[in-house]
Amino acid sequence: MGKRKKIAERVTTLMDKPEMIRNIGIVAHIDHGKTTLSDNLLAGAGMISMDLAGRQLFMDFDELEQARGITIDAANVSMVHEFDGKEYLINMIDTPGHVDFGGDVTRAMRAVDGAVVVVDAVEGAMPQTETVLRQAIREGVRPVLFVNKVDRMINELKVEKQEMALRLGHVIDNINKLIRGMDEEKYKAGWRLDAANGSVAFGSALYNWAISVPQMKKTGIGFEEVFDYCKNDNMKELALKCPLYVAVNDMVIRFLPSPLQAQKERVRVVWHGDWDSKVGKAMAACDPNGPVAFMITKVKVDPHAGEVATGRLFSGTLERGMELMISGISNTNRIQQTGIMMGAERVEVERIPAGNIAAVTGLRDAIVGSTVSTEAITPFEMIKHVSEPVMTVAIEAKNMRDLPKLVEVLRQVAKEDPTLQININEETGEHLMAGMGELHLEIVAYRITRDKGVEIKTTPPIVVYRESVVGKAGPVEGKSPNHHNRFYIEFEPLEAGVVDLLREGKVDMKMDEVQRRQMLMGEGMDKDEARNLVNFFGTNMFINMTKGIQYLRETMELILEGFEEAIRNGPICREPVQGVKAKLMDVKLHEDAIHRGPAQVIPAVRQAVQAGILLADPTLLEPFQNVFIQVPQDQMGGAMAEIQGRRGIILNMETEGDMIIIKAKVPVAAMFGFAGAIRSATEGRAMWSTEFAGFEPLPANLLLEAVKQIRTRKGLKPDMPKPSDYLKA
């Protein structure tokens, strides 16, 4: 503990020097060696023993992570590294690689300025590598590359020296191709990775060694020597001569920007306020004396200290006792403690200036994504997750006396993990939890019992569906209960390109209207419709095509409320609606405001929307996953039969050596039990991974049966509803 305290003291002396700070994330596909690499960097900083590096897995401090051998939570640590005779502070976040915990990667990317992308030398860039790289580039986070497990290439694949160089070059080319495809401007502006300039390092995190071109010049050890060391199984000596932490940390300090450099550009990506305002200038300059601008990226409950909110401080200084405002909350919160994270431990410090990753207690109203400040400022952009929840479980307390506590615990869990969707129905007592996949839900359920002390029962996971339309309908008339107000609305599917823009968060109501209109028209939307967009909810749009109707402006808020209510619980089976365009064509309003209040307008619009969706050739959309399988040629048949037997479509097949790489698309509903089935179908020789691939219409022959099942489960009448069920006579 004394050792950590000393390190904490060194860390605090560097906190005030933003040019000496690097905020970095370690990102990769599952099992490519992120946590093992983190161990090495920590050992280099003197935080764990060098002998345990690569095996201790310091950042996987949760017993579940250790038992399963995977990272589940992003973990933060601050450490000091010496480069060219100067000390630098590196704030590092080790992130998960499993697709079910991708939300943690997205949130971590908001806190950092640079990312070390780890790639397995044998497997190369995998689907999740692409996903995490996309998350980083979307957030304006600069990547460098660490090619791990080079020893496997030499000792397992038995490649020769020439072939080794070619294969490593191929890995770098693939990553560069991805960066170029995602952001050509940044690629040309110096984000291209190049082994010659030192923005790529090669090594083995398990055996604690790494080399890069600048290191080769210092040590005289290049690929030839590495090859011989690995062949002779003398990696201990190699680790002494070329320690991994030196190569990687030197690369981080040389190529990844300090907060001082990064914030000039990065803040533009994550904040859309006034650049010439006091806080805008303070963030661009990383000014510790400016107003506080703190973005929360993680909330965790500490049994002793309560909620600990971790995030990136872009300007100002955090100190104990400060009263801070939280976006969307009227009252202020007072900071009780300020600290930095050292893996599982939180070390208290007196103050934390701009440019650092801070952990504070006392912000009880903060959630992930909250903007915390000393004065009212434009909030940071919401964090946009790549995946959406695709599976749901119902949760009950084993003991009835735990019921009130369970509701409290579920609210807390939703606060800690924004990728979970918790639906608490106080009337029926049914609590639903939707997550990214089977593993995600299983781990959250386990932790509710272990950490929160509430014993629960969960149902087997069920798939989340969406409702949509494939045809047109309307104008559909919605009448208010007093019959004095009438709304005429048309419905049709929203253009696929527009749905993508909304899902990716490229369009919002705050942006310049002309720019928004151009973007919508570019995806095939009609000019008048694009001009008359009133608002959107999820991937559904509400458009006002009427002209000069009296009292419409003051009623519009209520109309939108009715629309939102109807699409949150769609008419087919109360699942969320997506991809629907609703156009208000005509309105008849009572001239007396008292007769067109919420109790009249909201039900009228809601009924028109519910009936309109049922009239416009309704359908259910089911979630799909892209499935990537690496399998030896002689086991290919078993893998393909497994995919095809699950309503899967094979999209692509490539041969690499004696391995076949299959890319397929499979409905999530058919993926239950896939892990065991693919193992037995390929004698355990298949490597596979998945990523979220969006929602697609359910085949017509399965629609009625699916609707019946979902409605029965929800206690609704099992038959497909009719428009007349919703329209007022």
Image: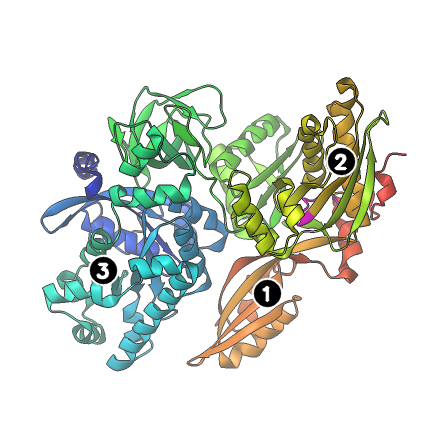
| Observer able to see residue 88 | yes
Amino acid type, label 3: Asn
Which of the two discs, 2 and 1, sits closer to the camera?
2
Q: How far across and how far down the image is residue 348, in percent?
A: 27, 29
Q: Earlier in the sequence, mark 1 or mark 3?
A: 3
Q: Quadrant of residue 641?
A: bottom right
* Mark 2 vs 3: CB contact within 8 A: no
- Residue occupied by mark 3: 208
Q: How is the image coloured?
A: rainbow
- Residue occupied by mark 1: 665
Amino acid type, label 2: Arg
Amino acid type, label 1: Lys
Which of the two discs, 2 and 3, sits closer to the camera?
2
Neighbourhood count class around disc 3 (C-alpha, 10 Å): few under 14, some 14–19, many 20 upward: many
Q: How far across and how far down the image is residue 515, in percent?
A: 52, 47
- Residue occupied by mark 2: 606
Q: Is label 1 in a helix, a strand or a loop?
A: strand
